């Protein structure tokens, strides 16, 4: 096994391309590995982070006429962007999607989708076999059961995939808070989508702006 380590193994926004796969009503209806609203929140957070860092994002669905449109919360992050609708269950067999990824010129492929064991595992395993550096965002994905999600993760790790959560991806893109061009945008995403971390940040700002009580007496 080739270990993923060293500075060059970390994600870089200038080398990353994000593919969001099949975040649709049909798949969500049988999502049992995660709380559904959490997956939506995490995926939107990931999408907003990608936009903040200038990471090209490919949006794709499978037979949307029957399975439902991409969640509007995600589509609204990229207004007017084409959503690629496929017939292939395996996204990496869909030439239009793969051509869109290749056109970015990026080499760090980041994937999230529904379901983990089907629509995430298949393109991940195929892309790994073709030499891509693949990261799967586990908490912006989900399966039909906890077992299905976890078995898929083990299967993809065995194939060489990197596993991360959405906030870890965004933090790796940021890397240094001195990068002020993205730090403010990243903070906004954290406040909106990172739960307790966002609330803690707002509390910190409140405390910093609270006048020190006078000691008159």
Image (cartoon, rainbow, N blue to C red):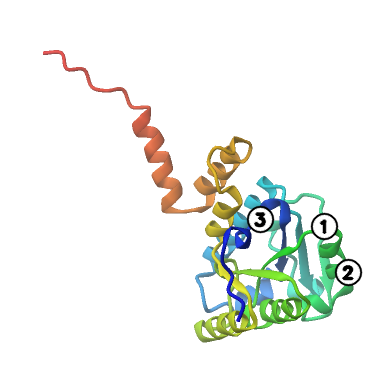
Q: Mark 1 touching mark 2, by CB under 8 A?
A: no
What's the CA distance linking mark 1 and mark 3? 17 Å
> Is residue 15 shown left or right of residue 178?
right
What's the CA distance linking mark 2 and mark 3? 21 Å
Report the quarter where the C terminus lies. top left
Residue 129 image point, x, y percent: 75, 81
Residue identifier under label 1: 104
Among all residues in the image, which is located at the extreme left? 217
Residue identifier under label 2: 96
Task: Say if 20 sits above or below 204 in the image.
Answer: below
Residue identifier under label 3: 47
Report the quarter where the N terminus lies. bottom right
Crowdedness of circle 1 by 10 Å Cα count: few (<14), some, many (20+)?
some
Q: Mark 2 touching mark 3, by CB under 8 A?
A: no
Q: How many labels sit on residues?
A: 3
What's the CA distance linking mark 1 and mark 2? 13 Å
Residue 195 image point, x, y percent: 45, 53
Tag 1, which secondary structure?
A: loop
Q: Quadrant of residue 203?
A: top left
Q: Quadrant of residue 201?
A: top left
Front residue of 111 and 41: 111
The disc, 2 or 3, on the residue closer to the chain's N-terminal end is 3
């Amino acid at each position: 096994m080739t270990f993923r380590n060293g500075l060059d193994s970390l994600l870089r926004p200038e080398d990353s391309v994000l593919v969001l796969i099949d975040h649709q009503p049909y798949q969500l209806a049988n999502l049992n590995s995660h709380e559904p609203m959490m997956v939506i929140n995490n995926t939107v957070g990931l999408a907003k982070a990608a936009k903040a860092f200038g990471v090209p994002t490919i949006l794709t669905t499978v037979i949307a006429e029957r399975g439902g449109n991409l969640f509007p919360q995600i589509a609204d992050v990229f207004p007017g962007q084409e959503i690629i609708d496929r017939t292939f269950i395996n996204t990496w067999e869909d030439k239009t999607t793969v051509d869109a990824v290749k056109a970015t010129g990026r080499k760090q492929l980041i994937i999230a989708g529904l379901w983990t064991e089907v629509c995430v595992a298949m393109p991940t395993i195929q892309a790994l076999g073709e030499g891509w550096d693949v990261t799967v965002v586990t908490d912006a994905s989900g399966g039909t059961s906890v077992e299905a999600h976890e078995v898929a993760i083990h299967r993809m790790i065995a194939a060489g995939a990197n596993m991360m959560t959405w906030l870890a991806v965004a933090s790796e893109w940021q890397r240094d808070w001195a990068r002020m061009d993205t730090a403010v945008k990243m903070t906004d995403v954290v406040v909106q989508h990172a739960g307790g971390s966002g609330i803690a940040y707002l509390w910190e700002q409140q405390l910093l702006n609270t006048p020190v009580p006078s000691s008159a007496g």
